[in-house]
Image (cartoon, rainbow, N blue to C red):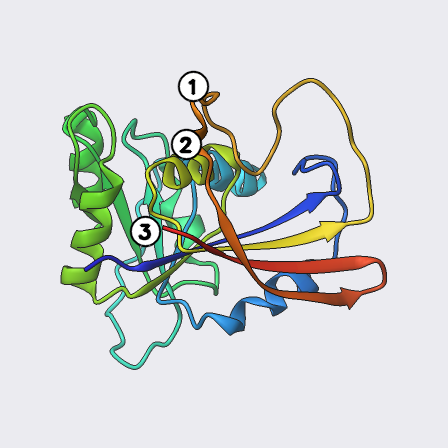
Amino acid sequence: MLPRIIIHNAISLDGRIDWLTFDLGLFYGLISRWNEDATMVGSNTLLKGFEELNQDQNETPEEMEPDPNDQRPLLIVPDSKGRIRNWKVILKQPYWRGVVVLCSEKTPKEYLQFLNESKIEYLVVGKEHVNYKSALKNLYDQYQIKTIRLDSGGTLNGILLREGLVDEVSILINPTLVGGTTPQSFFKASDLTSYEGVIKLKLLSVEKVAEDIVWLLYEVIK
């Protein structure tokens, strides 16, 4: 079994995720729909989000006793290159009850040692890169993770969409146009070579959730 994967992104009308100004309370207020067991955040997104808090990259997190009654989601972070070090700062945030890092056989041994010393749980899944299907199966079997919400940019979204692992796509369309030639979309992947790679969707709902902001919800047809 694999967890159910939901992409939840805010975009401009032309599909871009940069230069957006939107109500974070509105964006995150909608996620209660899924009652997620885990939030998967790409390493680029996490580094960018916490760069201002990144005073000491190698500071060891405080050891915390797991609370079986803690209902907050688990944080899942793919980081096969071993880039993230400021776990103490990240785990002080009130959003998650703990973290599991996804690594590969190419992840530096020094980083795995750092995770061990920091009491950070991790899974080694994949050779060169993270094998997401194997990772999701492990998360389901070992951590009883049944629903994961992606809180990420276009690269991680693109990987999971191309691999057929996404079940639902939730999009908040902001009343803006950005333009540009760089591919800052919520779905960043290699160009297709045939129509077979086109992902088909089934519309579940359309809702105006704020002035001029529309929430679209789609099921991925597999």
CA–CA distance in space, label 1 to label 3: 46 Å
The first of marks 3 and 2 along the sequence is: 3
Kindly give the residue lying farthest to the right in the view shown: 211
Residue occupied by mark 1:
193
Q: Which mark is residue 61?
A: 3
198 vs 7: above or below? above
- Is 102 left, or right, of 77 in this rendering? left
Residue 131 placement (x, y as % from top left):
22, 36
State yes or no: discs 1 and 2 in contact (Cβ < 8 Å).
yes
Which of the pair 161/57 is nearer the observer? 161
Q: Residue at x 68, y 44 (%)?
A: 11
> Can residue 55 be seen by looking at this rendering?
no
Quarter of the figure with the N terminus: bottom left
Residue occupied by mark 2:
197
Residue 23 placement (x, y as % from top left):
74, 58
Q: Residue at x 46, y 70 (%)?
A: 34
